[in-house]
Amino acid sequence: APHRPPITMLAFTLSPLAAPARPALPSAVSSAASPFLAPAPFARRARLAPAPPPPRGGAAVTRAVADLADADFDKEVLASELPVLIDFYAQWCGPCKLIAPILDLMADEYEGKLKVCKVDTEANPKFVKKYKIYGLPTLVLFEKGENIAQVEGAISKKELTDFISLHLPNVC
C-alpha cells in the first residue's frame, strides 16, 4: 500500500496507523471549562434500586374490595343477598390498575347496598371462559347469583355509577 502522509488538524496529528492522540491543553484551559472535554453526566451515575410499586388502589384509599378465589366465589357471589360487582383483572393490566381506586371508592359509597369484589383471571382462569371475559378489566354485575350485566374496559366513576344505576335501580 502506498504510504500516506499524516493529516494535521488543529493542534494534533492523526496517523492512519496510530491511535489518535489527545491534544495538549494550554495551561489556561482546563477540562472543566470546556464542555467538549468534560465527562458525560451519565458516565458515573449510581444505579438506584427501583422503588416498590404502590399498593393497588393507591395509598390514600382504604381497601374495601375483597379479592376472591375460586373456593370463595360461590359463597360470596352466587349465594350473596346483596348484588355483587366483580372486577375481573390481572396484575399486569394497566387499565385494571387505573380503575382500582374507583372501585375502592364505590365499595365505600355503596357499603351495605352493593358488594364489590375482584377476581384475578390468571389465578382463576375458569371464570374467563365461564363468564366470557374477552378483555380486561371486565366488570360484571350479579344479582341473586345471576350475571345481569357486564362492561369491558376502564371506565370513569360517573360511567360506573350510571352502569350500576341502570341495572340496579334499587341500589342507587
Image: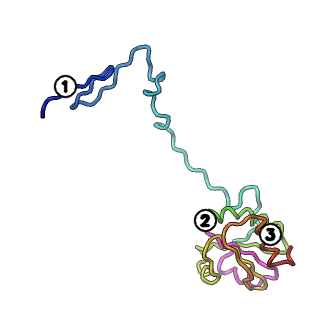
Q: CA distance from mark 3 to mark 2?
A: 22 Å
Whole-percent x, y for residue 166 in the image: 81, 76
Left or right of residue 110, residue 13 in this image: left
Q: In the figure, 83 relative to 32: above or below?
A: below
**Quarter-wise, where is residue 70 in the image?**
bottom right
Q: CA distance from mark 3 to mark 1?
A: 81 Å
Whole-percent x, y for residue 146 in the image: 74, 85
Q: Mark 3 vs mark 2: which is more N-terminal?
A: 2
Which residue in the protein does label 3 denote?
A: 161
Left or right of residue 36, residue 70 in this image: right
Q: Amino acid at mark 3?
A: Thr
Q: Amino acid at mark 1?
A: Pro
Q: In the figure, 60 relative to 5: above or below?
A: below
Q: Amino acid at mark 2?
A: Cys
Instruction: Read off the magenta span.
Output: 68-91
Whole-percent x, y for residue 74 in the image: 71, 84
Which residue in the protein does label 1 denote?
A: 5
- Report helix, strand or loop for mark 1: loop
- From this viewpoint, is residue 75 visible? no
Q: Residue 104 or 153: which is nearer the viewer?
A: 153
Q: Mark 2 vs mark 1: which is more N-terminal?
A: 1
Q: Residues within 10 Å of mark 3 (few under 14, many from 20)?
A: few
Tell me if residue 88 is in the magenta stretch.
yes
**Quarter-wise, where is residue 30 in the image?**
top left
Tell me if residue 138 is in the magenta stretch.
no
